[in-house]
Amino acid sequence: MIVLNIITIGLKLLSAYAMFTFAIPKLRSLAVSVKSFTQFGDVLGISGKGFMYFTGGLELVTALVLLASVFLSEKWGNHTSIAAFVLLFSTMSGALITEYFIRETPVPMLVNLAITLLLIAISQLIIKFI
């Protein structure tokens, strides 16, 4: 059980780091994010910048909830862990939909990262409910 807890904490920290890494370029309006989200906005018929800030904010919230779940008591930590992994699952599902159906050409590295984080979320949610 202790080993499983250590692995879970490691996966939370790794996932939080990845989500922070995804959020920062969007929230800072870095050129690469603006370019991508302008294209996404054109395809979807919405504000690309608004979509970029929404996505970056969602990624930041996901990272913060993942971090919070590491430090909260067992009772609150369990609820927070479930919320964190549901957010991670949802965010990465959206990322994969964006890569395959909205981006002109999917970026393999982003697809691989999204799939990895999606699998982490699924595995942790299964563990929580078994």
Image (tube, helix red, strand yellow):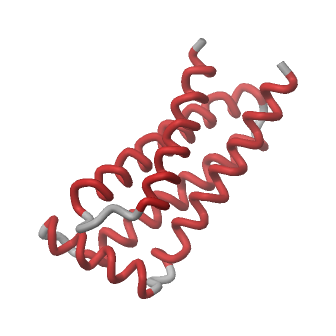
Q: Quadrant of the N terminus?
A: top right
In this rendering, position of residue 1 left or right of residue 51: right
The image position of residue 65, as x and y in percent, is 61, 48
Of all residues, the one furthest to the right in this rendering is 2
Q: Which one is nearer the viewer's eye here, 67 or 13?
A: 13
Q: Which one is nearer the viewer's eye here, 123 or 58?
A: 123
Residue occupying the point 49% across, 41% down: 118
In this rendering, position of residue 104 left or right of residue 60: left
Instruction: Say if 48 sits above or below 127 in the image.
Output: below
Of all residues, the one furthest to the left in this rendering is 45
In this rendering, position of residue 11 left or right of residue 35: right
- Report the number of numbered marks: 0
Residue occupying the point 69% across, 51% down: 14
Residue occupying the point 85% across, 26% down: 3
In this rendering, position of residue 86 left or right of residue 36: right
Of all residues, the one furthest to the top in this rendering is 130
The image position of residue 44, as x and y in percent, is 16, 65
Residue 79 is drawn in which quadrant? top right
Residue occupying the point 22% across, 55% down: 101
Q: Quadrant of the C terminus?
A: top right
